Image: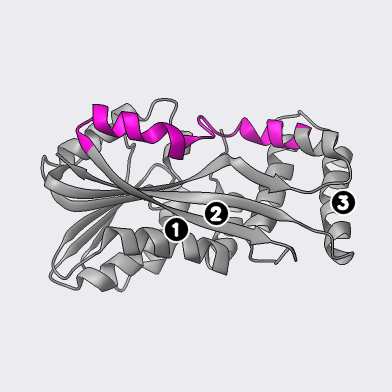
Amino acid sequence: MLKFDTNTARLLENVYLGSDVSRRRRASFDALLPSTGETILDLGCGNGLLTAELARAVGSTGQVTGLDPSPDMLSLAKTRCAEFGHVDLIEGPAEEMPFADNQFDKAASVQVFEYFPDTRPALRELHRVLRPGGRLVIGDIHWDSLCWHSDQPARMSSMIDIWDGHLADRCIPATLPPSLRECGFEPERVVPVVICDTTLRPDGLAMMTIRLAESYAVQTEQVPEDAAAAWVQEQFDLAKQGRFFFSITHFVWIAHKT
């Protein structure tokens, strides 16, 4: 699994403010339909960007709670949400939430479920803490939608296979609906968010994936450092030549507690 330590948190902080990830976050925000006075759970809140946006939407009469297992990510979230007296940020696992039954009106989770070997424990907890009819929004990437150009396709395929090791499930958007139903939710609809980069922008999802995949491959000792660097350099060279291409689709599922 990918470790969300201080260095990873810094990298994500920059890219999460960029246009690609902002669009994904906005898709979840719009799907959640936050309203004044609501209580909302941000599961896997990370650095608190969505948490802060939800806090503004529900106002001081509402309450937003962020839950995340990473103290490094929560440290960023606490700084970002310091101005909001109606935000709680709590360290803890999704499988055992420290909340009362029927506590929240709505819940959102962005790119978290792909890290769960079994999504059902977290979904059962969400069902427990949401009120009857409560709205649930889960956004994750379907990694089978990845299109990534390379003049060395065998090496690219190998790097992608290695990168897959940081996930528990690379196809969450496709496998989620049956689990939702099993755990007491009714899926309503899914919204695709396509990310396509042909210029390798510094704040883009492609740049983040390159840097994280390089680091993960070296840290897990599956690729020598010079080989990983060569893979990265090819992508920068392709970008300089106007031949860079990276595309992937993020899907936002909307469901409600039955």
Is residue 210 at least partly visible in the picture?
yes
Q: Is residue 88 above or below residue 144?
A: below
Nearer the observer: mark 1 or 3; the answer is 3
Q: Residues within 10 Å of mark 2 (few under 14, many from 20)?
A: some
Residue 147 x %, y %: 69, 47
Residue 9: which numbered mark, if any? 2
**Mark 1: which amino acid?**
Asn
Circles 2 and 1 in contact, beta carbons < 8 Å: yes
Looking at the magenta stretch, what is its main secondary structure?
helix
* Front position in the image: 103 or 69: 103
Residue visible at 28% across and 58% down in the picture:
32
Secondary structure under tag 3 reads helix
Report the quarter where the N terminus lies: top right
Classify mark 1: helix, strand or loop: loop
The answer to the question of whether label 1 and label 3 lie on touching residues, with beta carbons closer than 8 A, is no
Question: Nearest the camera: 253 or 11?
Answer: 253
Residue at which label 1 appears: 47
- Check disc 1: other Cα within 10 Å, few if <14, some if 14-19, many if 20+: many
Residue toward you, 208 or 85: 208
Q: Position of residue 111 (x, y in %)?
A: 46, 46
The residue labelled by disc 3 is 234
Q: CA distance from mark 1 to mark 3?
A: 31 Å
> Mark 2 or mark 3, which is nearer the start of the sequence?
2
* Mark found first going from the N terminus, 2 or 1: 2
Which residues fall within the magenta stretch? 158-185
- At which x and y percent is residue 231? 84, 45
Give percent across and percent down for residue 26: 41, 65
The answer to whether marks 3 and 2 mark residues whose Cβ atoms lie closer than 8 Å is no
